[in-house]
Image: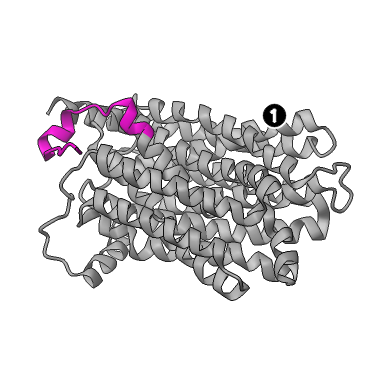
Amino acid sequence: MATTLSVPDRAQTRLSRVVVFLFAVTAGSSAGCLYYLQPLLHEISVDFSISTATAGLLIAVTQIGYLLGLALVVPLGDFVNRRRLVTGLLAVSCVALVAAGLMPAYGGLLTMVFAVGVSASAAQVVVPWAAAIAAPNERGAVVGNVMSGLLIGILFSRVLSGLVAEVGGWRAILFVAAGLQVAMAVAVWFRAPEAPPEAAGSGQSYPQVLRSILTLVRTHDVLRHRMFLGGLTMAAFSCMWTAIAFLLAGAGDSTYSYSEAEIGLFGLAGVAGALVAPVVGKLADRGYLRHTQYGVWGAQILGWLLLWAGAHQVVVLVIALLVFDFGVQGVQLANQTGVYSLDGRARSRLTTAYMVAYFAGGVIGSTVGGWAYQAGGWPLVCTIGTGSAIVGLTTWAVFSWTERGHPVQGRAAHAELRAAARG
């Protein structure tokens, strides 16, 4: 049976590795649902006799559903029982995935993947949940591990999708994903710790909850800063992973020529990079949040330069993916560690504000990636990406200066966390 933690207990309780792992897998399995069909769009277009562009709407509609879930569902995490909310979203995800796999018509499939996208917002309920019940002096590391699980879910979904589809066709991955969501729903219900919602009893109506998100954005300059940096990072991430599919498939002047399953395996390099990224959260817990931002933006710049050099060298390309995805995940962890320190009663709403900006950047990046590869090939993609990373590093330098003395910065944040941990 799930354990209930009182508010005082939360400040002193170290989360077990099993619980952190459960949160990480739940976040990853939910976020992965957004991308299972991405490597299979050509097969789907043939099955339904539709154009590639029309098939591509599946991913766009899924992401639109996800953004809607971020905006309308995730804020409820501050006010309702998160264990019930996450379990319910996982159950909806299971039903929608099975229905999508059984749909005989493309229109029905579009409707079901929209529902899959909305229910995938469970991933962003889990992250502030973990932050809320983690001890203050371990919050950065816990958020880092859960966010790594989320990113690994996104990256590994492409690998799993290609392998399963090669054996059972594109519908098979939807049924496999549904089975995984059932397992996670059961695990969350029986194993996840339960804690009172931070803003429960506030008396706010649902419309007031949504309006309070805008108030948070207006109130916290740190939140606005991280929203910009997060959107820029996700735009670069989506741009690269959209364009690299064309590069590896041999489009344009590319010298590569890989199958869909082989292209999916390149996601393993990104997974390896993401596994290293929790070190950023640990450094943030020790009072080096400001410094880690410079390091991870530098890693993104280096990653883009290596990606450019890897246009014709697969070994260099794999190394580039390791470095690049470490930089992307590192920026994300540093951003969220800062955001979650702003208001302990509003972590779900802070997540909504931040992640809507983050995934809006992803939609822009996916569009730019396809256009850039068609217009100027891999060199143009890397030029745009390198430029975005330089803008990110420069902007962070400005934000860091304007935030000097703010509790989220450097050793001041560390001292505050240690004091909170001592009670």
Q: Which residues are magenta?
A: 1-21
On screen, residue 391 above or below 8? below
In magenta segment, residue 414: no
Q: Position of residue 410 (x, y in %)?
A: 35, 31
Secondary structure at badge 1 equals helix
Please state if 254 lies on the left or on the right of 272 as rendered: right
Q: What sort of colour scheme is used for the picture? A: one colour
Q: Position of residue 287 (x, y in %)?
A: 34, 27
On screen, residue 344 above or below 1? below
- Which residue is at a point 46% across and 43% down the rendered structure image? 28
| Residue 108 appears in the figure | yes
On screen, residue 242 above or below 21? below
- Which residue is at a point 82% across and 52% down the rendered structure image? 377
Please state if 317 lies on the left or on the right of 339 as rendered: right
| Residue 403 appears in the figure | no
- Which residue is at a point 51% across and 42% down the rendered structure image? 153
Residue type highlighted by circle 1: Ile
Q: Nearer the viewer, residue 386 or 77?
A: 77
Q: Nearer the viewer, residue 168 or 32?
A: 168
Q: Position of residue 217 (x, y in %)?
A: 33, 59
Quadrant assignment for the C terminus: top left
Q: Position of residue 4 (x, y in %)?
A: 15, 39
Q: Residues within 10 Å of mark 1 (few under 14, many from 20)?
A: some
Please state if 287 lies on the left or on the right of 385 as rendered: left
Residue holding disc 1: 319
In magenta segment, residue 20: yes
